[in-house]
Image (tube, rainbow, N blue to C red):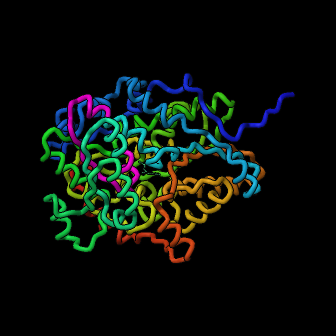
Amino acid sequence: MADKRIPTKMYLEESELPRYWYNLNAVLKHDPALNPKTLKPVTAEDLSEVFCEELVKQELNDKDEYIPIPEEIQEFYRMIRPSPLTRAYCLEKVLDTPAEIYYKFEGNNTSGSHKLNSAVAQAYYAKQQGLTSLTTETGAGQWGTALSMACAYYGLDLTVFMVKCSAEQKPFRRAVIETYGGKVIPSPSETTKVGREILKAFPNTGGSLGCAVSEATEKALETPNCKYVLGSVLDHVILHQTIIGLELKAVLEKYNIEPDMLISCIGGGSNFGGFVAPFIKDKISGTKNYRIIGVEPASCPSLTRGKYAYDFGDTGKMTPLLKMYTLGNGFMPTANHSGGLRYHGMNPFVSKLYHDGIIEATSVEQTKVFEAAVTFAKSEGILPAPESSHSIRVAIDEALKCKETGEKKKIVFCLTGTGYFDLKAYTAYNNKTMTDYIPTDEELQKGFDSLPNIEHNK
Ligand SMILES: *Cc1c(COP(=O)(O)O)cnc(C)c1O
């Protein structure tokens, strides 16, 4: 009998790589985004003021389940993909669990995360449209890095509004963005009207993604031949990230692995959405009964403690209204170390999937997350991003439950990125100065008070 041992690293051949993205919009409808002025569903025209045309088409496409990936983007993907699926044999041994643990590793590129999957697509479409520059926001810095790489590749100028506390905590992240030619402005800044207003109201704020989105949008509206691009939250970003889930599905089939659990962390929902989208149809139809679990920080618990309501995507109330789980556009998350997960809202699909009970969500505390990160680093060798370590925490907890019950569950999680720029956070954990913060109900209420007072929310 041949050795049936599952390999440690599983890849797809170049010829097996997905040539299409998966469009969940064609399978499952969520409540439409609304124009905040008319309260009518947003039109392509509304969105095209700030976004690239092709991305707007993708955002509103609810017909095509598969959308072809342009050959030029496939060419770029071939430099950084496929990402490997790894069997975590060493972690399993350390945990002494009968569970099988697998992870799809998206951190194998210079930007260090999955964000490059969408950045390259967005920059490509901007270039096709004849634009000369883009603006964006970045929280932890991974999106800004990915987009600066993509803009350098396509010869576009880029301005990145970087959440201030993150720009201060991660000067080297900033240096990478600048090396690829991106211009970094710590946010909130004096360079925009909305930035000046936020600074007046919160002079000492370390900023938030919601603020940075407002500033980047304003800047795009005022710059000729320039559009704004977003690294998460919207459906077209999930669309690009489905490359992760499509590869995963193909490689699981290739190696005959039937997962019991799919786990990933959620900030705005893009990696999670892309990771699980190709599995949703089977889950809804009941053909497959995997558990699908999103993990968020206890300090910014959009799904587990938020409200399902229409809200703005930004603090300055400039974006369309999205029906989503939200802590309120006025929610100011505390400065925890998982910058990529500090966002008040959530992608509308992920929100609907949670609302309909198709997926589960759980929240975890920072020190527990870092404990899991260190266990993983010591056994599997990779220094994980704090965001990704939320998934590791839950994967480890589920594997430890299997140890109790003797079940051989197959646990698959998305390792979204690496933590080389998060060493301040690791230092705080190592020195035992890291703290946990869980907002009180009163604190959350302040955020909920900022929800738009419209008929749809009553
Ligand atoms: C941005 C980021 C996340 C969270 O963003 P999503 O859009 O929710 O996926 C998670 N992990 C890493 C490494 C990130 O950079």
Question: In the picture provided, is 191 more to the left or to the right than 350?
Answer: left
* Of residues 458 and 211, the one drawn nearer to the viewer in this rendering: 211
Q: Residue at x 33, y 46 (%)?
A: 148
Q: Is residue 383 visible?
A: yes
- Which quadrant holds the N terminus? top right
x%, y% of residue 32? 29, 38
How many numbered discs, if any?
Answer: 0
Residue drawn at (20%, 35%) of the image: 131
Q: Is residue 389 above or below residue 203?
A: above
Q: Which residues are magenta?
A: 124-146
Instruction: Tell me if 89 is positioned left or right of 142 in this view.
Output: right
Q: How far across and down, in percent of the image, does residue 219 sit?
A: 17, 50
Q: Decide which of 100, 220 is in the foreground and name it.
A: 220
| Horizontal and vertical percent position of residue 135 | 24, 47
Residue 143 counted in the magenta span = yes
Vertical placement of residue 93 versus 109, above or below = below
Residue located at (41% from left, 62% from top): 300
Q: Is residue 432 magenta?
A: no
Of residues 232 and 31, the one drawn nearer to the viewer in this rendering: 232
237 up-or-down from 75: above or below: below
Q: Position of residue 271 (x, y in %)?
A: 46, 44
- Report whether residue 458 is seen: no
